[in-house]
Amino acid sequence: MEGMAVKKVGRGTYKQQISDDLRQQIADGTLAPGAKLPTEAKLTDQYGVTRGTVRAALEILVNEGLIISARPVGHFVRDRKPMVVRPQAEFRPRPYTPEMDAFMTEHEGRAPDQKIEVSIWEPSGEVAKRLQLESGELVVARRRVRHLDGEPFNINDSFFPLDLVRDSAIMRPENITPGANETLAELGFRQVRAIDEIYVRMPTPDEVRRLELGPGTPVAYHVCTGYTEDGKPVRVAISVYPGDRHVISYERRREAQPDSEA
Amino acid sequence: MEGMAVKKVGRGTYKQQISDDLRQQIADGTLAPGAKLPTEAKLTDQYGVTRGTVRAALEILVNEGLIISARPVGHFVRDRKPMVVRPQAEFRPRPYTPEMDAFMTEHEGRAPDQKIEVSIWEPSGEVAKRLQLESGELVVARRRVRHLDGEPFNINDSFFPLDLVRDSAIMRPENITPGANETLAELGFRQVRAIDEIYVRMPTPDEVRRLELGPGTPVAYHVCTGYTEDGKPVRVAISVYPGDRHVISYERRREAQPDSEA
DNA sequence: AAGTGGTCTAGACCACAGT
DNA sequence: CTGTGGTCTAGACCACTTA
């Protein structure tokens, strides 16, 4: 039988030994993707520890994103990237076709639910700093969650200084067909420069809620700040990409294959 | 007093209420970066629950990467990006200066420890698939962990089909000054195309060990596959970037500020 | 020596799905 | 109903660092 008793035999704590054992079974296919793990009670017997210890071991695997807990049914091996997602997505720092998302999505499925929430906000410190706002200045937030096949796919929030866009199309919750950047340009704030920052981190509870994330799912956090000719920041776009639903992928041609000599 | 008893008052489980409370204190600066949290015993008193429940709450924050546990000293608010790291790093899909890393690092500090482990491996499924190897074919692995100021900074492993590079400079553990790609080109395998894939996920235990990662630290996982003119894959480079030590950052100029209208 | 967090046990009650 | 995982309690022992 797999999962023999663990007491006194191996190295490390019990929960480590147990999670290592299960992780190995997942890696070598003994526990295939989608397979149901033994119940906590069974694992308790097999390994000869208490339920709490078994749960601690399972929690490790949950936090690694290897298994999920489907509430009163059991634990299951997670489908690694069962994913719809982004084959051949564009990742181009430089303009190719205007109005193209730096992380433009090629969806075979549909992407409905362009519900955009427009509201006036006191900006978070992060946004205020990038827009160089004095304390008390407000921003217009255009917040949306993009969906794909009914599932939340990513977060796409944009922030503009309220002073700049008051009464413009940007403040209306409809989709802006020419694009917010074009609207901004018509208001006299054409962006000529942008700084992109990409962070990798665990999601906030708010992101967990909006994207319906499971445990063990990190996100890529992309902040794009757009500047006008004279260096004034006029727009901050924040995108959040769940790690389990996205692969950033691109292709390079010609000579000089980077990634350094190793 | 902050952290009043939690029983029966708020919504959600106790550990949720407690972690929410602490998270709020971290967000609003009541608990500044680097600050020490109350001991588990104190929190136990303050919230009126058992130590196990307090620990469950703290574990949530640890897994979110908000706090760290410095073993027998206490829990501390994590310094968000206290980081050396990559201001203005290049992120250029296209060649600018040859031999430049797609994720080239600008280090103010030093980057010693270019220890490279060269070994002959049975390739993992991931590598074998990308190199289109038959089962049984071996690869040469050049594995290294780059350090910055003595701390592990990222993983940089390259894999080449053994047949192609046998007895070449690639099999020697020294740094290859002209670059592995140049060496490969001299062997007749000039790369003209590369496919990059970037995943965001939690680290494997192996990565945790090599990079000395703490809990709650996701990684960006970058796979670069290089192809010759006739479409033969000759090189797979795998880089792993800890989320707590890297910011991928780049700047764009000129018109067309992507990131889509929102 | 004292105090910290890390681990484990033993037992209890709950909400929720499927039978 | 039964069985599942989710939560919580109460108490114990340990390893480690610091004073």
Image (tube, coloured by chain):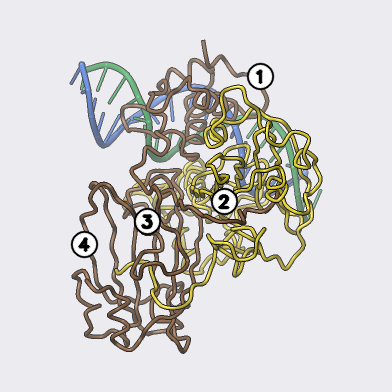
Chain colours: A brown, B yellow, C blue, D green
Asked whether the viewer can see residue B9, the reply is no
Q: Amino acid at mark 3?
A: Glu
Amino acid type for the residue under numbered disc 4: Lys
Image vertical order of residue A188 relative to residue B129, above or below: below
Q: Which residue is mark 4?
A: A115
| Image mark 1: chain | A
Disc 1 versus disc 2: nearer the observer: 2
The reply to whether discs 4 and 3 touch (Cβ–Cβ < 8 Å) is no
Q: Residue at x 60, y 45 (%)?
A: B238
Q: Are marks 4 and 3 on the same chain?
A: yes
In primary-sequence order, the first of circles 1 and 4 is 1
Residue identifier under label 2:
B192
User: Residue type at mark 2?
Assistant: Val
**Rounded to the nearest whole Å, what is the CA distance between mark 1 and mark 4?**
57 Å
The crowd level at tag 1 (other Cα within 10 Å; few <14, some 14-19, many 20+) is few
Both on one chain, marks 2 and 4? Answer: no
* Horizontal arrangement in the rendering, residue B72 relative to residue A246 (left or right): right
Q: Chain of mark 2?
A: B
Q: Which residue corresponds to the image point at 36% horizontal and 86% vertical from the top-left?
A: A189
Tell which tag, 3 or 2, sits nearer the viewer.
Answer: 2
Q: Which mark is residue A207?
A: 3
The span from disc 1 to disc 2 (Cα, nearest Å) is 55 Å
Q: Nearer the viewer, residue A192 or B180?
A: B180
Could you tell which of marks 1 and 3 lies nearer the N-terminus?
1
Q: Which mark is residue A8?
A: 1
Q: Is residue B146 above or below residue A42?
A: below
